[in-house]
Amino acid sequence: MSEQQPAVSVIIPCRNERGRIEECLRFVLAQEEPQGGFEVIVADGMSDDGTRDVLERLTQADRRLRVIDNPGRIVSTGLNAAIRIAKAAVIVRMDAHTEYAADYIRQCVAVLEETGADNAGGPACTKAKGYIQRAICAAYHSAFAVGGSRFHDVAYEGWLDTVTYGCWRKTVFEQVGFFDEELVRNQDDEHNLRLTRAGGRIWQSPRIRSWYKPRGSLSALFCQYLQYGYWKVRVIRKHKLLASWRHLVPAMFVFWALAGWMSFLIHPWLGAAYVTVLGTYALLTLLFSVQASARCGAGLLPLLPFVFLVYHVGYGSGFLLGLLDFVLLRRSGRASMGALTRAAASSESTGATPASAEGDWK
């Protein structure tokens, strides 16, 4: 590899990842090298759990690895800091909570060149450990849980509106700008929206293989999707554009479930509509739970209805809170970094979630 000009710059945001970062980087540094080689830039969000000690030790062992500070402590600020100092013409984003095929970087570059895309990546594959994670994974790949987003289809190849992580030519960031640093979540969603609105194209290929490790509990899953729904409103407000009507479905359901009972006070027919909606939802949840359990294991059936409910109620509740903060109270992104998102920003902010997952329901 040329010390001065590698072909690819791999960027990894992280914070407080002492238990994961060494294994992650050893896998990354063992990747098959594309022609011209690669460098790895880790943007550390001022870790205070010993992560930095691990990183400094690893930099002594491999000259391809560089570590920089990310004072902003969130994903978007870390990604931007790494992109700005990247030496290569091609940027590949990777994540500390994901496993990668040995040819991941090489395939990213190959697909980018073959398709002429402005952003390329693979589908959002998952890997589970334990019963609850298996159920979360089964629902994650169901159109009923995430609104039919194509990047959840592990076999899909072609153009789409977002992709897991991403591989770009560095010039893309010069043309459409960097990641929005007001966004704690959904920064990839917003950047891809800007890219496609500017005429850019995004390609997904199953040749680019990685495996995301989802949350391990329903409470963690709820908090995750609460944030996704919340920050989605910030993206919509910024662009004054609803990319898909399905963004509204979880919020409408949650609102109707909470307030629809008052329809009985207005007219019996409205009350009947309330019961019908809830009954239809329960039936659909059961049907898709049976479908997902048939695909991933019959033993998951008892838990799957609750997993689907957490996906929907988490996202819908976050969306409603986002409407309150960003639309009614007119808060900016920075002003909205309250308890809802600060906890996540400090404990899992800079690398716990695949980029595309942040765009669920888009």
Image (tube, helix red, strand yellow):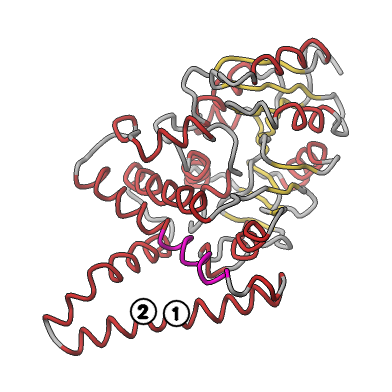
The image quarter in which residue 87 lies = top right
Tell me the kind of residue under disc 2.
Answer: Leu
Q: Is residue 307 magenta?
A: yes
Which residue is the site of mark 1? 282
Residue type beneath disc 1: Ala
Magenta region includes residue 109: no
Q: Answer above or below: position of 324 versus 85.
A: below
Closer-to-camera residue (140/157) = 140
Q: Identify which residue is drawn at 70% across, 25% down.
A: 89
Q: Which residues are magenta?
A: 303-313
Image quarter (top left, top right, bottom left or bottom right) of the N terminus: top right
- The residue carrying pointer 2 sits among few (fewer than 14), some (14 to 19) or many (20 or more) residues within 10 Å by Cα, namely some
| Location of residue 210 in the rendering, given as x and y in whole percent from the top left corner | 74, 47
x and y percentages locating residue 60 in the rendered image: 79, 10
Answer with the quarter of the image where residue 154 lies. bottom right
Tell me residue 290's x, y (percent). Answer: 62, 79
Q: Are marks 1 and 2 in contact (CB under 8 Å)?
A: yes
Judging from the image, what secondary structure is the residue with disc 1 in? helix
Camera-side residue of 159 and 270: 270
Residue at x-position 41% and y-position 83%: 280
Query: Where is mark 2, residue-wise?
Result: 278
Seen in the picture, residue 211 relative to 279 is either above or below; the reply is above
